């Protein structure tokens, strides 16, 4: 989970059949979202981060990437590629 850690059995996981590179993209996105997320954020920001965390694809659209960049910049949690 992008905002916490849970232990669940493998039989309860649904496979999206991602390629290794896509798995890395998802992990990178998860790390970025986790760096920003905090209980003290505005509800709108929390909702946006949660929506990005629930995407069923391993990439962000151009608009989603811009929104995440703005949040990283605003909250001082940018990452260097």
Image: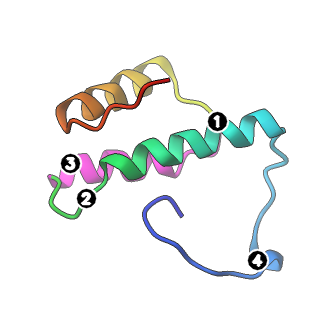
Residue at the (79%, 50%) spot, across then down: 16
Which region shows up in magenta?
42-57
Nearer the observer: mark 4 or 2; the answer is 2
In this rendering, the answer to whether 54 lies above or below 22 is below
Q: Name the residue under label 4.
A: 12
Mark 2 and mark 1: Cα distance apart in space: 22 Å
Q: Main secondary structure of the magenta part?
A: helix
Q: How is the image coloured?
A: rainbow
For mark 2, does the 10 Å Cα neighbourhood hold few (<14), some (14 to 19), or many (20 or more) residues? few
Mark 2 or 3, which is nearer the eye? 2
How far apart are the two marked residues, 4 and 2, measured between alpha carbons? 28 Å
Q: Do tag 4 and tag 1 residues touch (Cβ < 8 Å)? A: no
| Residue in the foreground of this view, choosing between 34 and 46 | 34
The image's mark for residue 44 is 3
Left/right of residue 40 with respect to residue 50 in the rendered view: left
Is 3 situated left or right of 54 in this image?
Answer: left
Q: What element carries label 1?
A: helix
Residue displayed at 52% across by 73% down: 5
Residue count near mark 3 (Cα–Cα under 10 Å), binned few <14, some 14–19, many ≥20: few
Q: Earlier in the sequence, mark 3 or mark 1?
A: 1
Q: Horizontal and vertical percent for residue 72?
A: 29, 33
C-alpha span from label 4 to label 3: 31 Å
């Amino acid at each position: 989970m992008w905002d916490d850690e849970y232990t669940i059995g493998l039989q309860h996981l649904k496979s999206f059949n991602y390629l290794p590179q896509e798995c890395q993209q998802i992990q990178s996105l998860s790390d970025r979202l986790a760096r920003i997320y905090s209980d003290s954020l505005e509800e709108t920001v929390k909702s946006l981060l949660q929506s990005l965390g629930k995407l069923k694809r391993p990439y962000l659209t151009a608009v989603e990437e811009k929104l995440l960049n703005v949040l990283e910049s605003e909250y001082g949690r940018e990452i260097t590629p």
